[in-house]
Image (cartoon, rainbow, N blue to C red):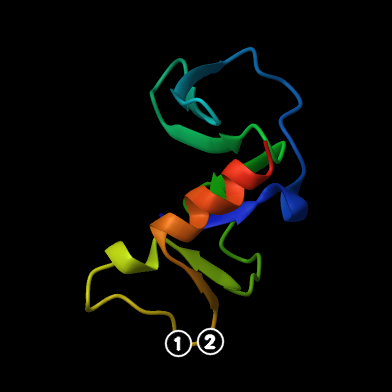
Amino acid sequence: MLAIDSGVLGSIKNESSITRYQSSEWAERGFCSKCGTSLFYYLKPADQYHFPVGLLEDELQFKFSHQIFIDEKPEYYSFSNETENMTGSEVFAHFESQQ
């Protein structure tokens, strides 16, 4: 999933139509309670939301700056620009150190 972090977009203001699911000790996923669309991934220790790019308007311009779980990506998948990369182990270590 391509995602934008909340440093760019902000946070959730009205959750009346959102259902949260605790997917791990340190993260939650948010879904539309009416249609089931995935709306965000929330990292509790960092108080940071990640929103799927597909929810945003097409004319918005973003730079892909980093990739996580790079060790699990398909061989055919890559961005055209250079990015900061983290393996799954590095991602978990990063967020465990913030608790």
Residue placed furthest toward the top: 16
User: In this view of the protein, can residue 12 be seen by the observer?
Assistant: yes
The residue type indicated by label 2 comes to Glu
Whole-percent x, y for residue 68 in the image: 46, 62
Q: Crowding at label 1, few (<14), some or many (≥20) Cα neighbours within 10 Å? A: few
**Considering only vertical position in the picture, is 53 above or below 81?**
above
Image location (x, y in percent) of residue 26? 55, 31
Report whether residue 2 is seen.
no
Mark 2 crowdedness (10 Å alpha carbons): few <14, some 14-19, many ≥20? few
Q: Amino acid at mark 1?
A: Ser
Q: Relative to residue 72, is residue 92 depicted above or below?
A: above
Q: Position of residue 78 (x, y in %)?
A: 36, 79
Q: Are marks 2 and 1 in contact (CB under 8 Å)?
A: no
Reading the image, the residue beneath label 1 is 80
Taking the spot 42% from the left edge, 64% from the top edge, the residue there is 87
Secondary structure at badge 2 equals loop
Q: CA distance from mark 2 to mark 1?
A: 7 Å
Q: Residue at x 49, y 48 (%)?
A: 92
Outermost residue on the left side: it is 75
Does residue 5 appear to the left or right of 93 in the view shown? right
Instruction: Pick the residue in front: 40 or 75.
Output: 75
Number of numbered tags placed on the structure image: 2
Q: Which mark is residue 24?
A: none
**Quadrant occupied by the N terminus:** bottom left
Q: Which residue is mark 2?
A: 82
Q: For residue 63, which quarter of the picture?
A: bottom right
Q: Where 84 sits versus 44, above or below? A: below
Residue under the image location 61 percent in, 73 percent down: 65
Which corner quadrant of the image does residue 34 belong to? Answer: top left
Q: Is residue 22 above or below residue 71?
A: above
> On the rendered image, what quadrant is the C terminus found in?
top right
Q: 6 or 97, which lies in front?
A: 97
